[in-house]
Image (cartoon, coloured by chain):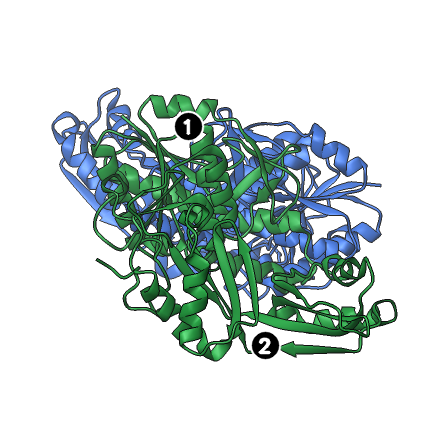
Chain colours: A green, B blue
Amino acid sequence: MSLLVIKFGGTSVADIERIKQAAGKVAAEAKRGHKLVVVVSAMSGETDRLISLCRSVTPLYDLREYDAVVATGEQITSGLMAIALQQRGLRARSWQGWQIPMVSDTAHSKARLLRIEADKLRARLEDGEVAVLAGFQGVTEDGRISTLGRGGSDTSAVALAAALNADRCDIYTDVDGVYTTDPRLVSQARKLSRITYEEMLEMASMGAKVLQTRSVEMAMKHKIKVQVLSTFENGIGSDYPGTLLTDEVNMEENLVTGITYARDEAKISVIGLKDTPGVEADLFGPLSDANINVDMIVMNVADPAGLADITFTVPRGDVSRVIETLKTHKDKLGYQNVLTDTEVAKVSVIGVGMRSHAGVATTMFRTLAARGINIQAISTSEIKISVLIAQEYAELAVRALHAAYGMEKG
Amino acid sequence: MSLLVIKFGGTSVADIERIKQAAGKVAAEAKRGHKLVVVVSAMSGETDRLISLCRSVTPLYDLREYDAVVATGEQITSGLMAIALQQRGLRARSWQGWQIPMVSDTAHSKARLLRIEADKLRARLEDGEVAVLAGFQGVTEDGRISTLGRGGSDTSAVALAAALNADRCDIYTDVDGVYTTDPRLVSQARKLSRITYEEMLEMASMGAKVLQTRSVEMAMKHKIKVQVLSTFENGIGSDYPGTLLTDEVNMEENLVTGITYARDEAKISVIGLKDTPGVEADLFGPLSDANINVDMIVMNVADPAGLADITFTVPRGDVSRVIETLKTHKDKLGYQNVLTDTEVAKVSVIGVGMRSHAGVATTMFRTLAARGINIQAISTSEIKISVLIAQEYAELAVRALHAAYGMEKG
C-alpha cells in the first residue's frame, strides 16, 4: 500500500463537473488501496477575481489582508472536493493550511513554508480517511493566513509529500506531461516518460508553465517522485501515463532531453566602457539593486584604446528600467553608447547526458551554422547550452536541433 | 471613550463602493475616539452562490464541508474591509472565527457559540487597532470551521459585544430602523426610536427581517444596547439615528409599540376528536416530533356526544406534512374530519405597556368588530395579543388598529 499525494490545478477543478471527474480519478486510486492526500487549487478564474477585488479597494493593499481574501479560493474547492469524494463513497475531509498546520514565514503573498506539523493528518490517513488540502496557503507563527505565490499549490503538494514521506506526488494539470520541446512548434515533439529534477529546472521557460519552480527544487531536495499528467485524459497516476520527475537517469534516454526557447528577452550592449578592474560590478550592481534579472553576459576584450563592450540579456519588460539605471550611473561607468535589440530569442538544449558526453555543443553550433543562423551570445551550465539568435530564426533553430539530436517520437 | 461593535449586513457591503462607504462610517466613529470592532457579512449574493456550489455537487452535502465553503464569503469581506479601513488611515486587521477564537458547538450550518476567547483581540483593541471580524462563523473544539445559520453575523456581533462588554452594538442594514408596522402597508407607520428586547422578539415576523432572533435573545440576556440603522443614509450610530433595543421602557412611548401581520400561516381544524384526557398530547406530540411548529391553538368544548374540535395554525409550507402526520395517527386519535384554510392572516399588537394597562385587547376587538372583521382564533402573551382573521382583511385590520392605538407619526 502506497501513500500518494494528488494535486489538481485550477483547470482540473474549473467547475462542478470537473471537480466530480477529478474525484473519479481519486476514487480509482483508492480502489487500488492507496492512502490519499488530495491537494486542490482554486477553481480557475477565482484567484484573479479575488485579486481584482483587493485591487479595486486600493492598489496598495495590505498583503496580509490580500492573503486572507485570496486563500478563500482554495478553501472553497477543498470543501467541494471533500463533498464530491464522499459522494463517491470515500471518507474524506477538507483541511485548511491553518488546520494542518502548514507553518510559513511572514512574507505574505509569497510566503515560504517553514514546517508542516502533520501528526494529526497522518493519524487520519492511517485511519483510512482521504485528506483534501486547500493548496497555496499556510499560516504564520502568529496565526495569520499566508499564501505561497502563484502556482503555490504545487509547492503545497510536494511539501506535504515530503512531510508525509509519500511514495509519489501526482500533479494533474491541463497538459499530459513534459515534452522534448513545444509541440505547437515541432509536431515531432515527444512526451518524456521521465526527466530529472535538474533538467526540469533548466527547462523552466517551458517547465514553469507546468510546475512552479520552487516545487521542483523542493522535490529534488527531498527526492520526491513527482508525476505530471493530464486531468482531461483517461487513466490515473498509478498507471504512469505522464512524465515522472526523478533523480534516476534513464540510460536509454537521449543525450539531450529537451529544447526550449524564450522570446521574451532583450539584448543590451554597453559600448566603450573603460576596461578597469571592477567595471563589471559597477555595471551589474545597480541593475541587481533595481531587481533586474540579468541572464547571459558576454564581454569583449578591450580594444587598443582600453575600452570594452559588455552585452547581456534581460527580460524584455525591463529594458526601459535598464536604460534608466545605466543613465543614472553614466558618470561612474563612462560608457560611450548603449544599444538595445528586442528582436532576439534564446534557444537552449538541455540534458544530464551532457555531463559525460562531449560533442553536444558542437552538434548545436554545426546545426545552426548549416542553416546560416548567427550566434550572438552563448552561455552554458553543466546540463544546458543556450544561444542567443535573431528572433526570426527561433522556430527554424528549434526544429533543426530537435531533428539533429534525434529526439522525434519513436 | 466607548467600545463599539459595528455590524454591516450583506447589502451594506454588496460591492467595493459600498464597502468603502461603510469604511467611511467606521472612520467617522473612530474620529469620535471610540474603540471599534467591525463585524461583516458576506457580500450580498455570495452566500447563495456558495450554497448553490455545494448543492450542485450533491444535495446531501456534508455540513462540515458546507461550512468550510460558505464561511469564505465573510472571510473575503473581512479582508476587503480591513484594506478599506487602512485606506482611510486606520490601523485595522481582519479576524476569522478561528483566529479569535469564537468557539461553537458542532451543530454545523446552525452552530451555537459556546464561548469567545477574546484576550488577544482585546489587547489589540486597547492598542488602538480596529478589529474586523468575519461574521457568521466560529470554530469547533476540534478545529473545524462552523457557521451560525442565516443572519448569523448579527449573533456574531452581539456575542462579541457581550464578550467585550461593549457600550453599544450598531447593526447597519438596508432599513433605517424598526417601525410601528410595515410602512409599505401603512404610510403613517412611525420609526421607533427605541424598543424593548421582548417587544422585538414578539415582533419576530417583522423584526426577523431586521435582526436574527437569536441575536435579540442574546442581547436581552447580556443587556447589550443594540441599534438598528440604515447604511444608506448619512449619519453614524453615535448620533442615534436608528432604533435602539434596550430594556429601558420609555414612559412616553405608546401603550402599543408595534403591529405585525403574517400571511404565511394556515389554519387546521381537527373535527370530532374523542374528548379524553391526553388527546391534546396525542395530537400535538407527533406534530412536534415531525418538527412542525404549531402556533395558535383553540379547543372547543366537547359536544353532548363527547366529541371535541381542535383548531391550530402552522406555517403554510407544513400543511401537507400535518395532514400526512394526522393520517398516520388516525386510529389512535379517532377524529372524524380535518379542515384546512390557507386564506388566513395573523395580526398582532405588541407592547410592554400592556402588562400594566387593561383595555388593549378590548380596543383591538372593538376596532375589528367595527370593520365587520370576524376573529377566528385568539392567542395572547404578556405583551402581545394575536388574532387570526380572513386574509382579505389583513391590510384593513392593520391600518385600523394602527389608527385606533394612535400610533401615527407625530
Chain letter belonging to callout 2: A
Q: Residue at x 27, y 62 (%)?
A: A408
- Secondary structure under badge 2? loop
Q: Residue at x 21, y 51 (%)?
A: A234
The three-letter amino acid code for the residue at tag 2 is Thr
Left or right: B87 in relation to A165? right
Q: Is residue A188 above or below residue A128?
A: below
Residue B351: which quarter of the image? Answer: top right
Per the image, the residue denoted by label 1 is A165
Query: If the image is split into quadrants, where does the N terminus of chain B sit?
Result: top right
Q: Is residue B24 above or below residue B322?
A: below
Say whether mark 2 and mark 1 are on the same chain: yes
Q: How many marks?
A: 2
Residue B154: which quarter of the image? Answer: top right
Q: Residue B314: horizontal and vertical position, in percent? A: 33, 42
Distance Cα–Cα, label 1 vs label 2: 46 Å
Q: Residue A162: horizontal and vertical position, in percent? A: 45, 32
Per the image, the residue denoted by label 2 is A342
Left or right: B218 in relation to B59? right
Q: Residue B27: horizontal and vertical position, in percent? A: 77, 55
Nearest the camera: B306 or B222?
A: B222
Q: Residue at x 82, y 74 (%)?
A: A305
Observer able to see residue B14: no
Toward the right, the furthest residue is A331
Left or right: A15 in relation to A208? left
